[in-house]
Image (cartoon, helix red, strand yellow):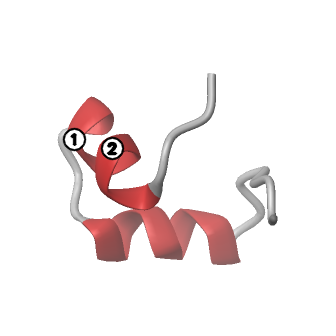
């Protein structure tokens, strides 16, 4: 399943900034 940051934020009930923080802390992401 591939989702963008907004969709991921909605799934987790978090802000987009939180998702970005998780990425900076090592959350795996697919860059394309």
Q: Residues within 10 Å of mark 1 (few under 14, many from 20)?
A: few
Rounded to the nearest angstrom, the CA distance separating label 1 from label 2 is 5 Å
Q: Is residue 12 left or right of residue 5?
A: left
Q: Residues within 10 Å of mark 2 (few under 14, many from 20)?
A: few
8 or 32: nearer the eye? 32
- Residue where numbered disc 2 is placed: 7
- SS at mark 1? helix
Q: Is residue 5 left or right of residue 9?
A: right
Q: Is residue 7 above or below residue 29?
A: above
Q: Are marks 1 and 2 in contact (CB under 8 Å)?
A: yes
User: Image quadrant of residue 2?
Assistant: top right
Residue 28 percent across, percent down from the top left: 79, 50
Residue 29 percent across, percent down from the top left: 75, 54
Q: Is residue 10 left or right of residue 24?
A: left
Q: Is residue 8 left or right of residue 25?
A: left
Identity of the residue drawn at 47% across and 52% down: 4
Q: Is residue 21 above or below residue 7?
A: below
- SS at mark 2? helix
- In the picture, the disc for residue 10 is 1
Residue 11 percent across, percent down from the top left: 29, 31
Residue 32 percent across, percent down from the top left: 81, 65
Can you name the residue that lies furthest to the top here?
Answer: 1
User: Image quadrant of residue 6?
Assistant: bottom left
């Amino acid at each position: 399943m591939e989702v963008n940051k907004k969709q991921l934020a909605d799934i987790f009930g978090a802000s987009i900034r939180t998702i970005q923080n998780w990425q900076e802390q090592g959350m795996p992401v697919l860059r394309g």
